[in-house]
Every structure is written in structure tokens, then in C-alpha cells.
């Protein structure tokens, strides 16, 4: 199996800092653009009463982050066999989130939970298969135990579950007054 990643390089740190700087600089104008275009959150009536104050809040800010990361990867020629799977996962999950935000802004309801879960599973299985295929993963690192052998099909199931879980965990906590951002820090 692989060890799960290469060394952190100066170029990688520079790319991360550049992406951060671009997002920080461009985000105010992006927020004005999405506000002007009517891309605003609509709150469900059955939700918590405290969330009604969030009505009209600009939504789909993650689209800027996705655009910057994928744009920089393309600009600097960082898309290759080793980075395609993670970037494709980011793009596909981001596209699903953007579609959900767009539907919420237009109709007040996003993608229905069952449909969203189905799409997340489809994207996650594809991404997990692509990652396993790209890196030929045959073991995973377990804390305090070390490398544990894993069959490719089991890795795909485990990775798909992790992708869907993380996507939903961030989505749910993000709706709780920035909890996702706070836990990320």
C-alpha cells in the first residue's frame, strides 16, 4: 500500500497560501455579486425560529473556493494522475452543493434529502473507486496499530462512507451559525 501522501513541499504551502489570499481578496466582491444576482438563502418555515433572521443571506460562497482551487491547479499544471481523483471529488461534491444552494435560492427548498444522499453516494463511490484505482491502496493506517491490510472493495466502501459522512457533517454543522468553520479552525 501507499503511505497516504507525499511530503509537504514549499510549493504546496505556497499554493495553499495563494489560494487563501485570493479567496480573502475576492470574497467581498463575490458576495456582492451573488447578493445582486439573488442567490440568497430562503429559510424553511418548519425550521428553528432563530434561523428566520438568516433569510436573504447570500449563499454558494463555496463556489469561489472551488473555482480558486481548481483554477490554480489547472493554471499551475497540478492536475495529473495523482491529483485528478481528489480534485474531481472536490468538484463533484461542490457541484452538488451548488445545485442545492441554487434550488434553495430559487424555490426555498434544496435537493430533497433522499435524492441528495443518492447523489452523494454515487459521487463518493466514483471518487473512492478512482482514488483506490489511482493509488492502488491495499492498507490503511490505524492509530496505535499501524498499517492494516484492506481489500480494494472494502476500501472503496469505507472511503465512500467517509466522503458522504464528511459532506453531511459539514453541511449540517454549517447551518448552525458557522459551527463548521469554527470546528475547522
Image (tube, rainbow, N blue to C red):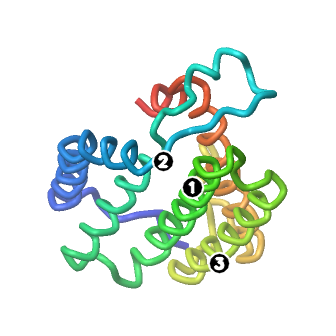
Crowd class of label 3 (few under 14; some 14 to 19; many from 20; radius 10 Å) = many
| Residue at numbered disc 2 | 39
Residue at point 47% right, 49% down? 60
Q: Quadrant of the N terminus?
A: bottom right
Crowd class of label 1 (few under 14; some 14 to 19; many from 20; radius 10 Å) = many
> In terms of sequence position, does the residue under pointer 2 or pointer 1 come before the other?
2
| Residue at numbered disc 1 | 102
Residue situated in front as seen by the camera: 39 or 143: 39
- Marks 2/1 in contact by CB < 8 Å: the verdict is yes
Q: In this view, does 174 lie above or below 48?
A: below
> In terms of sequence position, does the residue under pointer 3 or pointer 1 come before the other?
1
Crowd class of label 2 (few under 14; some 14 to 19; many from 20; radius 10 Å) = many
Along the horizontal axis of the image, is 44 left or right of 74?
right
- Mark 1 element type: helix
Measured in 3D between alpha carbons, the distance from the residue under mark 2 to the one under mark 1, in whole angstroms, is: 7 Å
Residue 137, image quadrant: bottom right
Rendered image: mark on residue 129 = 3
Residue at point 68% right, 44% down? 108
Along the horizontal axis of the image, is 122 left or right of 13?
right
Q: In this view, does 20 lie above or below 4?
A: above
Amino acid at each position: 500500500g501507499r503511505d497516504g501522501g507525499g511530503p509537504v513541499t514549499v510549493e504546496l504551502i505556497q499554493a495553499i497560501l495563494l489560494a487563501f489570499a485570493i479567496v480573502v481578496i475576492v470574497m467581498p466582491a463575490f458576495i456582492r455579486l451573488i447578493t445582486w444576482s439573488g442567490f440568497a438563502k430562503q429559510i424553511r418555515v418548519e425550521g428553528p425560529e432563530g434561523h428566520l433572521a438568516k433569510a436573504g443571506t447570500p449563499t454558494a460562497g463555496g463556489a469561489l473556493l472551488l473555482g480558486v482551487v481548481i483554477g490554480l491547479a489547472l493554471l499551475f499544471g497540478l492536475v495529473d494522475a495523482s491529483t485528478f481523483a481528489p480534485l474531481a471529488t472536490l468538484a463533484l461534491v461542490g457541484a452538488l452543493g451548488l445545485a442545492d444552494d441554487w434550488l434553495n435560492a430559487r424555490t426555498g427548498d434544496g435537493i430533497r434529502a433522499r435524492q441528495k444522499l443518492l447523489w452523494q453516494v454515487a459521487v463518493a463511490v466514483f471518487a473512492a473507486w478512482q482514488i483506490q484505482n489511482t493509488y492502488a491502496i491495499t492498507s490503511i493506517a490505524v492509530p496505535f496499530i499501524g498499517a492494516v491490510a484492506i481489500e480494494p472493495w472494502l476500501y472503496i466502501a469505507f472511503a465512500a462512507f467517509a466522503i458522504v459522512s464528511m459532506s453531511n457533517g459539514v453541511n449540517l454543522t454549517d447551518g448552525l451559525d458557522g459551527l463548521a468553520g469554527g470546528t475547522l479552525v
